[in-house]
Image: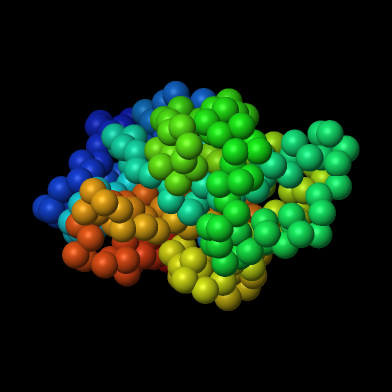
């Protein structure tokens, strides 16, 4: 039980894409994207102390001082409540979209009662664990190319996502759509009942340069059960594009950023870590 909350005087908006000191307060929306009752209340009143605090406190203010554009979203899956920054800016997914490519292909195989070959499963595994790109376009085309991205939008209830013909990595997503996609993977809509467990296991075993972001700052025991898929690429537009997606027990996180290529990959990686650290409950 919580104490009554005071009326919210104003909802702070995130100003994404500036070099000045940036600060944003959580914006409460329900799963459909419409403002919830909490959007008219403040989190100033503390909850009644409990013996065990939650892992995250998404009502905490997230403050960053970074160059470029960044945004975040936290999805409380148990309460079906989204928190995050506004406006709902988008950035491209790069390799993060491979999670959907694999999920869409596996679900469709299951729906046709087809058993993927050991070769196909090995290729999909490397695509998720090692972010191997060699075969990704092949599966994306088999999924229907842009039709597959449109199917992701409708299947997972995404509101800002836009696809690009002949490219999975140029898919534009908002941070809250990333958090929704993670939920969609976790609840079985994306990969279907037969392959959801397999896909989550692959995402929990991401390794190498793709293992970064939220998972790096989580407690060790939580890391073991957290599924991730990240994207990172310095594009011809002179920008690094960083996308972080994490799914845990009852929660998901989406963080998007793009900034000058001269700043390097780790600049965006640190942004994903910092946002997550600030959302963690301070015990």
| Nearer to us in this view, 129 or 280 | 129
Is any part of residue 154 visible from this angle?
yes
Is any part of residue 251 visible from this angle?
no
Task: Please name the residue shown 81% across and 34% down the image.
Answer: 111
Q: In the image, is residue 95 above or below residue 269?
A: above
Percent x, y for residue 12? 25, 38
Viewport quadrant of the N terminus: top right
| Nearer to us in this view, 238 or 8 | 238
Q: Quadrant of residue 266?
A: bottom left
Percent x, y for residue 62? 31, 53
Percent x, y for residue 99? 59, 50
What colouring does the structure picture have? rainbow
Task: Please name the residue shown 26% across and 67% down the image.
Answer: 264
Task: Please name the residue shown 61% across and 46% down the image.
Answer: 138
Q: Residue furthest left?
A: 20
Task: Please name the residue shown 37% across and 28% down the image.
Answer: 40
67 displayed left or right of 276: left
Task: Count numbered badges in the picture.
Answer: 0
Q: In the image, is residue 257 above or below residue 125?
A: above
Q: In the image, is residue 74 above or below residue 281?
A: above
264 displayed left or right of 202: left
Q: In the image, is residue 255 above or below residue 89?
A: below
Percent x, y for residue 256? 37, 49
């Amino acid at each position: 039980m919580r104490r009554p909350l005071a009326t919210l005087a104003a909802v702070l908006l995130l100003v994404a894409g500036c070099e000045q000191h940036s600060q944003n307060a959580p914006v409460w929306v329900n799963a459909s994207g419409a403002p919830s009752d909490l959007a008219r209340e403040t989190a100033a009143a503390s909850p009644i102390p409990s013996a065990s605090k939650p892992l995250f406190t998404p009502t905490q203010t997230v403050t960053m001082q970074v160059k470029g554009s960044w945004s975040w979203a936290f999805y409380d899956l148990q309460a079906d409540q989204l928190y995050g920054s506004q406006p709902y800016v988008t950035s491209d997914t790069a390799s993060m979209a491979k999670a959907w490519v694999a999920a869409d292909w596996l679900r469709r195989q299951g729906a046709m009662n087809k058993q993927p070959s050991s070769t196909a499963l090995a290729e999909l595994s490397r695509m998720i664990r090692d972010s191997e790109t060699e075969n990704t376009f092949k599966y994306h085309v088999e999924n229907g190319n842009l039709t597959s991205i449109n199917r992701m939008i409708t299947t997972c209830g995404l509101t800002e996502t836009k696809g690009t013909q002949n490219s999975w990595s140029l898919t534009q997503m908002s941070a809250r759509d990333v958090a929704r996609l993670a939920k969609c993977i976790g609840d079985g809509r994306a990969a279907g009942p037969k392959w959801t467990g397999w896909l989550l296991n692959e995402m929990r075993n991401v390794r190498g340069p793709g293992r970064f972001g939220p998972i790096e700052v989580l407690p060790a025991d939580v890391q073991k059960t957290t599924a991730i898929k990240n994207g990172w690429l310095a594009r011809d537009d002179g920008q690094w594009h960083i996308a972080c997606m994490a799914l845990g027990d009852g929660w998901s996180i989406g963080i998007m950023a793009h900034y000058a290529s001269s700043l390097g990959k780790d600049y965006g990686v640190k942004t994903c870590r910092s946002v997550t650290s600030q959302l963690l409950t301070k015990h």
